[in-house]
Image (cartoon, grey):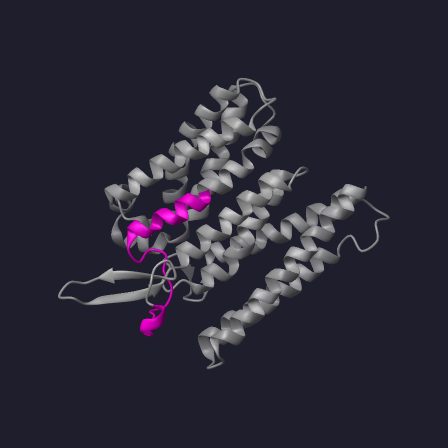
Amino acid sequence: MNQSYLIFMLGSALLAAGTHFFLARGLKKRGLLAALTLVFGAVLGAVCARLTYCLICIQDVLLDGIEETLLSDSMECTSFFGGAAGVILGAVLAAKCTGNRPMAALNAYAPAGALMAAMARFAEYFLGTVCVGRMIEDEAFQFFPLARGVDYGYDYTEWYLAVFMLAGIAYLTVFLVSLARFKGKRFLRTLFYICLPQIILESLRNYNRLTWTQFVRVEQLACMLYIEAVFLLYALWAGKGTKNRFLPAIVGLACAGVFIGVEFALDKTNLPHVFTYSVMAAGLVVLGVMECLGFKKIRQK
């Protein structure tokens, strides 16, 4: 594995742990809580990232060999959101070990987690073409951070859309918003807005092993399922008698249908990508508006 990547990730983890310590004021043993979250999150994040990949790509794993896949140092054999699930589990275990309520600990950790997610995306700069988009042939756009150059020797460099930079910037924005604006349901909402842009970011990626039948991008699907689950929770928490409490969930399903249509158009038609991605971006804006509406209903309740 790239040494620069490991060093960058170590520094990022320490930065996130320091942020977590600052945010955990009012929780028991916050120093120990931040330290255990760091350790548990690092271990479980790495394990869950690899195991999630193995579950999703079981056929490839059987062909390559289970032991070879589990022990491989290739970052292509990992799931980003599987790793995120491991980090969340680590935060829960750390809360249990320090006598804190898991949800209170997760709410405190949420901005730090978003910061860690952003730094993890930025770190993908050191991994070559693991998280890049289509090749950019126009020299006017062949510059970092918009594009990532891959040197193949003999003075030949190919440039690809730096999707990992777009993801990192999106997550960094979520970190700032979570820190400044999210007071209630902070963990739930922070994770929602991390998943939201990932729907279009996964579509922008040029190659992803975590794909079923060459069409369904698994992490994109997982993000949409989480978004819909949040909408359903908002409807349940709003309670009977709340007007249009299921509206966000219904709109969410409609947007999911639009996204499926967009993915089909990208794969099977010659529609301009500017148009198709604009439709997808508009759908994400609608989902964001629905989240604010759903949260407003439960806050009023």
- Residue at 45% over, 74% down: 267
Q: Is residue 44 left or right of residue 152?
A: right
Note whether 84 is above or below 131 in the view shown. Answer: above
Q: Is residue 131 magenta?
A: yes
- Residue at 49% over, 80% down: 271
Q: Is residue 121 magenta?
A: yes
User: In which quadrant will I find the N terminus?
Assistant: top left
**Depth check, front residue: 222 or 105:** 105
Give the residue at the far front of this rendering: 140
Give the residue at the far bottom of this rendering: 270
Give the residue at the far right of this rendering: 241
Q: How many marks?
A: 0
Task: Specify start and end residues of the magenta stretch as a single range.
Answer: 117-141
User: In which quadrant will I find the C terminus?
Assistant: top right
Horizontal and vertical percent for residue 178?
59, 42
User: Does residue 182 show up?
Assistant: yes
Q: Quadrant of residue 183?
A: top right
- Residue at 73% over, 52% down: 293
- Residue at 60% over, 61% down: 284
Q: Is residue 194 left or right of residue 164?
A: right
**Depth check, front residue: 125 or 244:** 125
Note whether 59 is above or below 280 in the view shown. Answer: above
Note whether 133 is above or below 187 in the view shown. Answer: below
